[in-house]
Amino acid sequence: MKHKIAPSILSADFGHLAKDIQMVNESMADWLHVDVMDGNFVPNISFGPDIVKVMHSHSAKPLDVHLMIEKPERYIEIFREAGATNISVHYEACTHLHRVLKQIRETGAGAGVALNPHTSVSLIEDVIEELDLVIIMSVNPGFGGQKFIHRTLEKVRQLKNMIITHNTDTLIEVDGGVGLQNAEVLLQAGADVLVAGNSVFKSDNPLMTIYHLKNLGIHTLYA
Ligand code: DX5
Ligand code: ZN
């Protein structure tokens, strides 16, 4: 299966959200990644469900909603109704992760868990069958434009082995500091989905950057 690209709307121009979503619609991106932050689980505050609903009304791509919030079980149905196709919660924010993952699947959304850089992949082995998606955070969550943490590569490899051992269809998504400089090596390690915020929206030509991320290898012809 070809890998997926999920531009992160957190790095878009908030004064022209509809225009930036239209760019993603016209691009080779697969999903639109939406970072929801509560100012509690992470220091930053981003968008609530009403804004996500507006994004959904403009987006031709499925919304990949990443909840960086405490007690996410309070908001699963609300974000599903706002238009989320995938809903990911943080391992560190869930006392009853198994229950929350079931709750997500019951809404019909894909269920995901995100792991902070300090959280070991081994901790999710007992719920791997409940997971459509695992987001390996390659930065500490809260902000776009941070530096990629190299140790992530080893975590992607470990998770890939776990998925093969348990024979599940779980996708591996990498989030934070991803761009053309490290995309290839992440895919080789086993990543299926690349989230890209600043590397897309702050580039000179976001459409071309998405094209190159989707067609890795081709960009080297023009380098
Ligand atoms: C970080 C968010 C990321 C962020 C990635 O908390 O989860 O999705 O938007 O942005 P870049 O790609 O700029 O690191
Ligand atoms: Zn994210």
Image (spheres, rainbow, N blue to C red):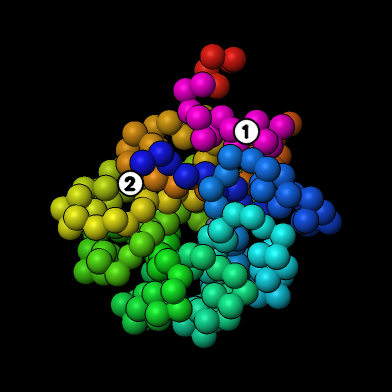
The residue positioned farthest toward the left in the image shown: 165
The amino acid at mark 1 is Thr
Whether 180 is drawn above or below 222: the answer is below
- Which image quarter is the C terminus in? top right
Local packing at callout 1 (Cα closer than 10 Å; few below 14, some 14-19, many 20+) is: many
Please tell me whether residue 212 belongs to the stretch shown in magenta: yes
* 9 in magenta: no
Side of 27 where 126 appears, left or right: left
What residue do we see at 48% from left, 28% from top? 216
Q: Is residue 6 visible?
A: yes
- Residue 148: image x %, image y %? 49, 42
Residue closer to the observer: 162 or 130:
130
Q: Nearer the viewer, mark 2 or mark 1?
A: 1
For the stretch drawn in magenta, the main secondary structure is helix
Q: Quadrant of ligand 2?
A: bottom right
Residue 200 left/right relative to 101: right
| Viewer-closest of 58 and 221 | 58
Please name the residue shown 55% across and 22% down the image.
Answer: 219
Magenta stretch? 205-218
Residue 9 or residue 58, whichever sits in front: 58
Whichever of callouts 2 and 1 sits on the residue coming sooner in the sequence is 2
Q: Which residue lies under the disc numbered 2?
A: 156
Q: Which residue is mark 1?
A: 209
Horizontally, residue 165 falls left or right of residue 183, namely left
- Ligand 1 is within 8 Å of the C-beta of the residue at disc 1: no
